[in-house]
Image: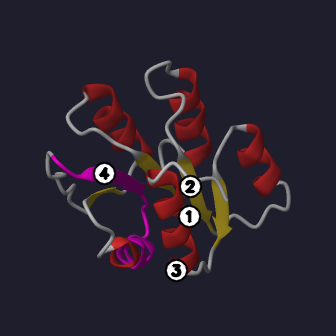
Amino acid sequence: MPLERANGNARSVLVVEDSENSAAMLEIAFLGIPNVAVLLTESAVEAMRILDSGDAHVNVIVTDLNMPRMDGFELIRRVRADCRLANLPIIVVSADTDPTTPSRVAELGVDAFFPKPFSPAQVRRKLEQLLDGRTP
């Protein structure tokens, strides 16, 4: 899945999702949000490279949890441990069925958790709140 570069004036959302179907659903859900560019990657390792490089100013991360090489839990831990990224809003969208997952991601400081199958409209609303600095 190719990474799409954000427009310099746009706010950007980094979607970290290894399922092409879920990534496409999220991208479609985010279309039409004014001044929002969607950056797509299928790997948490690549997401950290993007965040570390500073190539793109990311405003919100939307991530899956179950991915090869580095899972979403580790991505979240690394983001929260980095003083430059620690306050970055994070939305988790995952098919993880472990009943402890919502509390585990909450303890890591995520802003929202949506189990798959998810409502694209609900994820979009939460993203808009986070981009606009609103709380639920």
Proximity of marks 2 and 1: CB atoms separated by less than 8 Å: yes
What residue lies at 54% left-to-right and 32% top-to-bottom?
A: 87
Residue 126: numbered disc: 1
Kindly identify which residue carries mark 4: 12
Kindly identify which residue carries mark 3: 121
Q: Amino acid at mark 2?
A: Ile
Q: Earlier in the sequence, mark 4 or mark 2?
A: 4
Give, as a single range, the part of the protein colored magenta. 9-26
What residue lies at 58% left-to-right and 75% top-to-bottom?
A: 122
Indicate whether 53 appears above or below 33: above
Kindly identify which residue carries mark 2: 91
Measured as percent of width and height from the top left, residue 104 is found at 78, 46
Q: Is residue 20 magenta?
A: yes
In the image shown, does 116 or 68 lie closer to the viewer? 116
Measured as percent of width and height from the top left, residue 13 is found at 36, 54
Q: As drawn, is 124 to the left or to the right of 11?
A: right
Q: Amino acid at mark 4?
A: Ser
Q: Amino acid at mark 1?
A: Lys
* CA distance for labels 4 and 3: 18 Å
Q: Residues within 10 Å of mark 1 (few under 14, many from 20)?
A: some
Q: As drawn, is 6 to the left or to the right of 68?
A: left
Q: Amino acid at mark 3?
A: Ala
